[in-house]
């Protein structure tokens, strides 16, 4: 077949027709999307989609994927259940021409509904500096981290004495504070409070190291019974039963140590002594008095 | 192949009569097959680069070993996440994710598969900034600025490509031998 050369007019006309076809509404054009930049978790809203005819709608979120056929040229309703997880969501709409358009929006956490609260440690000696740490993570009803700054109150209620409140502010959804333990043993309740949301934890304050440890010796033959005074810390708190007290005896038979637990606040032990003996008592880092026996008890 | 040659040579040295050319060829094939099998069972996706910045971390400073472990497991988590989103199988997700993060990813993958979608992540690296480390060492919060190319497919059809920085708020907690991602939330640049 012989090819006929195209003249200038024919080429001009062909290009114009092509340009006109491309400018026709809906021709080779993806459906335009209008989405809000930010929505609250668990709230329904609508997306505006241009175009006509049927299309495919996709919603891709952190925990949820939706694909459905939709009619273009109107509002698409996004259900509250589609946007429960906070994060960035992708909306894609593909028209009948198979061209797709996409948009992103962000779902932010709803109002605070849960406090995830940690109190550390579970037992702490009294009057110890910076010994208690409280950390609260703030979540909404869908367990999204609420990272807009907010005030969290830490209400500290000791076994005896007045309640103290310390205020902290969340940063990226976390509020924390550090505090000293109070001077008296017993349970201390710390409650994290944010609006109507409260979460309480209990910590047990125990006596600190023994203070002014003293023992008495009562002899009987070549035996000696040793008994401490009630073992207390410097604030007068009784050390808990089970705390170990060490008695060390040195006589002509050598050196021997007996570790015994405190029972009802007092530690007791019995030694046999041979000749002159020296006996000392200790509890943790606290050293008590020494007793010297001449062996003629 | 160098190691296969070395092994074959070693075997010949032990008992020269036993190893005729045919046997060596067969043994080499078995070793090659094993190497290939190992290669196939090993991750398809390379570990992404993770840079951890823990300057000024409060209330507790980070130990060097903890920092190394966190960076490694964060990289493993992203590798596993990318594999899971592409294959629509959540098989290895529970090795690096727990709690809400695991539940959400698992749910998404199940729905992705149902819809016939898959997502390919081309990971160009993560810049992690540790912002909170609890005194008892039980939780660490980090901000991640990741350079990702995210391609969304319906079957074989590419629907969309998002290429650029993505920002995440991450909560990690320690387990017996690793740090797990407990929460992973993408946020916009304005919120970061």
Image (spheres, grey):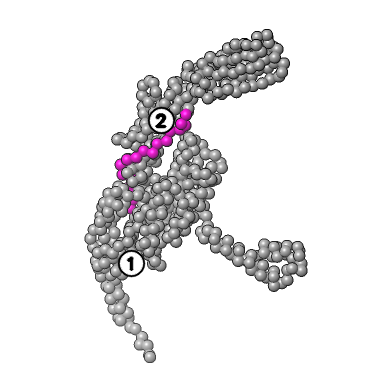
- Report in which chain the residue with disc 2 lies: A
**Above-or-below relation of A276 to A206:** above
Mark 2, residue position = A202
Of residues A17 and B9, which is closer to you in this image? B9
Q: Marks 1 and 2, Cα distance to the nearest angstrom?
A: 60 Å
Q: Horizontal and vertical percent for residue A14?
A: 30, 78
**Above-or-below relation of A172 to A224:** below
In the rendered structure, the answer to whether residue B34 lies left or right of residue B134 reads right
Image quadrant holding the C terminus of chain A, namely top right
What's the mark number on residue A99? Answer: 1
Q: Horizontal and vertical percent for residue A261?
A: 55, 23
Question: What is the tally of numbered marks visible in this picture?
Answer: 2
In the rendered structure, the answer to whether residue B50 lies left or right of residue A53 reads right
* Residue interval drawn in magenta: A105-123
What's the mark number on residue A159? Answer: none
- Report in which chain the residue with disc 1 lies: A
Q: Horizontal and vertical percent for residue A147?
A: 37, 42
Looking at the rendered structure, the secondary structure element under dot 1 is: loop
User: Which residue is located at x 25 percent, y 70 percent?
Assistant: A24
Please say whether residue A108 is one of the residues in the magenta stretch: yes
């Amino acid at each position: 077949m012989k090819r006929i050369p195209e003249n200038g007019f024919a080429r001009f006309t062909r290009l114009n027709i092509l340009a006109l076809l491309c400018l026709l509404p809906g021709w080779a054009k993806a459906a335009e999307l209008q989405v809000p930049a930010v929505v609250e978790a668990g709230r329904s809203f609508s997306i505006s989609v241009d175009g006509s005819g049927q299309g495919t709608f996709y919603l891709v979120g952190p925990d949820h994927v939706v694909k459905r056929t939709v009619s273009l040229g109107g509002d698409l309703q996004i259900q509250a259940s589609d946007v429960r997880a906070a994060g960035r969501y992708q909306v894609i709409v593909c028209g009948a021409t198979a061209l797709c358009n996409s948009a992103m929006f962000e779902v932010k956490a709803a109002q605070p509904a849960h406090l995830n609260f940690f109190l550390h440690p579970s037992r702490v000696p009294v009057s110890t500096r910076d010994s208690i740490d409280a950390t609260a993570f703030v979540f909404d009803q869908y367990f999204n981290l609420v990272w807009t700054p907010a005030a969290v109150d830490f209400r500290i209620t000791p076994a005896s004495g007045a309640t103290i409140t310390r205020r902290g502010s969340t940063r990226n959804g976390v509020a924390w504070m550090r505090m000293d333990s109070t001077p008296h043993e017993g349970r201390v309740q710390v409650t994290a409070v944010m609006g109507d949301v409260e979460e309480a934890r209990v910590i047990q304050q125990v006596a600190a190291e023994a203070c002014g440890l003293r023992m008495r010796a009562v002899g009987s033959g070549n035996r000696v019974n040793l008994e401490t005074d009630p073992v207390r810390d410097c604030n007068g708190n009784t050390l808990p039963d089970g705390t170990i007290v060490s008695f060390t005896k040195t006589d002509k038979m050598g050196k021997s140590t007996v570790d015994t637990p405190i029972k009802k606040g007092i530690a007791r032990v019995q030694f046999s002594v041979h000749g002159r003996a020296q006996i000392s008592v200790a509890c943790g880092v606290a050293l008590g008095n020494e007793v010297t026996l001449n062996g003629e008890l | 192949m160098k190691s296969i040659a070395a092994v074959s040579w070693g075997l010949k040295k032990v008992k020269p009569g036993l190893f005729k050319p045919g046997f060596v060829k067969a043994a080499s094939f078995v070793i090659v097959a094993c190497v290939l099998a190992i290669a196939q069972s090993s991750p398809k996706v390379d570990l992404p680069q993770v840079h951890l910045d823990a300057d000024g971390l409060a209330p507790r400073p980070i130990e060097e070993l903890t920092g190394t472990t966190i960076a490694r497991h964060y990289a493993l988590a992203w590798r596993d996440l990318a594999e899971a989103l592409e294959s629509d199988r959540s098989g290895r997700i529970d090795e690096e994710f727990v709690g809400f993060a695991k539940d959400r990813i698992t749910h998404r993958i199940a729905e992705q598969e149902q819809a016939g979608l898959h997502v390919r992540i081309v990971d160009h690296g993560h810049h992690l900034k540790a912002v909170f480390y609890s005194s008892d060492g039980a939780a660490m919060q980090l901000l991640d600025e990741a350079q990702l190319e995210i391609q969304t497919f319906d079957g074989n059809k590419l629907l969309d490509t998002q290429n650029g920085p993505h920002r995440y708020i991450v909560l990690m907690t320690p387990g017996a031998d690793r740090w797990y991602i407990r929460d992973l939330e993408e946020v916009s640049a304005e919120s970061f």
